[in-house]
Image: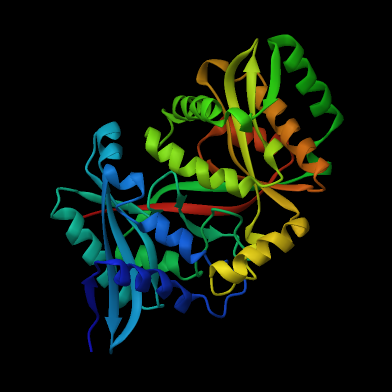
Amino acid sequence: MSVTVRPLSGASDTLRFIKLQWKFYENDRNWVPPMLMDRKKLLNTSKNPFYKHAQMQLFIAEKDGEAVGRIAAIINDNHNREHQDKLGFFGFFESVNNQEVADALFDAAARWLRERGMDSMRGPMNPSVNDEIGLLVKGFESPPVILMNYNPQYYPLLLEGYGFRKAKDLYAYLLRNKAVITPKLVRGQQLVRDRYGITIRDLDFKNLERDTLILKDLYNRSWEKNWGAVAMTDEEFDFLAKDLVQAVGKFKDLVFIAERNGEPIGFTLCLPDLNQVLIRNRKGRLLPGIWHLLTGTKRIDLVRIIVLGVLPQHRNKGIDAVMYYETVTRAAAHGVYKGEASWILEDNDPMNKGAKLMNAEQYKTYRLYDVAI
């Protein structure tokens, strides 16, 4: 029988779409199962504020009566407004190792996007640039860290077989405490503090609403010129912040704001790699997921540096070195001596140069692909 692809609708179909992911990773011990409740929340088009300016259609592929793949087609109106293009996206792609199945899924997504005026398709985005993005193309030897993607090694071949071509690579760097904290860094970051009046303050969780506004402003202003960046709406940032506050846990001091003479100019957001715990929760259920989180966090030995940003007018002064130093020393105080800085655009020369100066290893690569539709 040929491959058939049908659109999904309704809560039960969405749950089937989510659970189908387990089919492709049941024997892969590096895969970290998502929490079912988190995936439901992410895909809930009535409650996730992303969908106030975006549309999404889920599809499932079947062959001989068996589900063999899935994909989401996404239109982000805010992206197209900011970048003045007609770009659609695909996300949440999974497929058996069969080009016919993959082609049918991409065709369905492309057709849906084309009917709504899009002329090209990019992905994977799950579902936006502010979520999990990119296809893993290097670094399959270890599990992904928190909020990073993972996929079988044959996926790039399926995309390229359809006609996708590289749009941009995203790098993940591995940092180790002893390699980062060199005498040169210790001296240099102190000179930067003294020269520019740089101070670091913790996020004030007692005044979280005030500080969330500061972080939102810094985030949107720091990344507004980045390739593919889309500013978060107030609702989107608040929606994300609630989850991140829960994920930070005892590592609250790894979210901090850099100030110059008392003015906020940048911030760092790190999360403990909860994937080291959640990888044991093979079915993605709330229970025993919560039990694993409560009992396993003391074994976490890595944090992910998700955001390390400085306003454009304050860059190239070494302030990022101060923030790296703070991150590594604060993590060490928790008994954590490794970090992943991710993701960093392949052509973000200042950040890539900074990572290498920290003796970081570029150990994983994620790729975004484009195709004309």
Whether residue 231 can be seen here: no
In the figure, 263 relative to 233: above or below?
above
Q: In which quarter of the image is residue 204?
A: top right
- Quarter assignment of residue 371: bottom left
Question: Relative to residue 282, is residue 116 depicted above or below?
Answer: above
> Looking at the image, which is closer to me, 276 or 205?
205
Q: In this view, does 329 lie to the left or right of 273?
A: right
Q: Name the one closer to the observer, 240 or 303.
A: 240
Where's the C terminus, which quadrant? bottom left
Measuring from the top left, give residue 244's x and y in whole percent. 56, 45
Q: In this view, does 62 lie to the left or right of 265?
A: left
Q: Position of residue 291 (x, y in %)?
A: 66, 66
Residue at 37% x, 64% y: name it. Answer: 159
- Pick the front one: 209 or 262: 209
Q: Where is residue 261 in the image (x, y as percent from the top left)?
A: 65, 10
In which image quadrant can residue 175 be found? top right
Q: Which residue is drawn at 40% across and 75% down?
A: 20
Q: Is residue 65 above or below residue 96?
A: below
